Each structure stands twice: as structure tokens, then as C-alpha cells.
Amino acid sequence: METEDHNSQARLNDSATPAATVVDPVCGMEINPADAVGTLDYKGRTYYFCSPSCLERFHAEPEKFLAPPTEKPAPAPAAE
């Protein structure tokens, strides 16, 4: 019976939700916060980075990476 209880516990551990990931605001890469190369607190929120260059780029212009992307105008229809 002990083996059955042990196996039940192992299944519970296996089904646990995976570690949450975060998105590097510069390149968009999903990373585990524990694996982040660096972090930066900005306006009360912590941002996580996959590389030193992403951290440096964000540090230099954080609003550039936090602003919603601008919509590009739709291409004009091809002339027939």
C-alpha cells in the first residue's frame, strides 16, 4: 500500500503547474524568472531579461519597449 501512496504523490507532483514564465520586453522571448540574466524595476514593476543587451536597451529607453506597437497603414491595393 505504501508504494501506491508514493505513486499517487508522484503523480500530484508531476501534474503541478509548470513554473510561470515571463516575457523579455525587448525581444519578446519567454524566460523563467530564475533563469533571467538581469532584472530592472521600473514604475513599480520588475522586468526580466534574457541577455545583458536586452537589459541595456530597456534601461536606455524603457517607454519605447512598453508602448503599444503602432499600427502600420494597410498597403494600397495593387493597380490593375
Image (cartoon, rainbow, N blue to C red):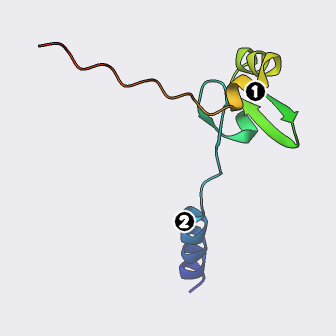
Location of residue 52 (image quadrant): top right
Give 71 or 16, whichever is nearer the viewer.
71
Location of residue 11 (image quadrant): bottom right
Res. 63 mark: 1
From the image, state whether disc 1 or disc 2 is nearer to you.
1
Res. 15 mark: 2
Query: Which residue occupies 60% across, 61% down?
Result: 17
Category of crowding for the residue at label 2, using alpha-carbon neighbours closer than 10 angstroms: few (below 14), some (14–19), many (at least 20): few
Amino acid type, mark 1: Glu
Query: Which residue occupies 74% across, 16% down?
Result: 57
Say above or below: 72 vs 18: above
**Which circle's residue, 1 or 2, is located before the other in the chain?**
2
Counting from the top left corner in percent of width and height, residue 10 is at 58, 68
Location of residue 1 (image quadrant): bottom right
Counting from the top left corner in percent of width and height, residue 46 is at 82, 39
Q: Quadrant of the image for the C terminus?
A: top left
Say above or below: 58 vs 29: above
Q: CA distance from mark 1 to mark 2?
A: 38 Å
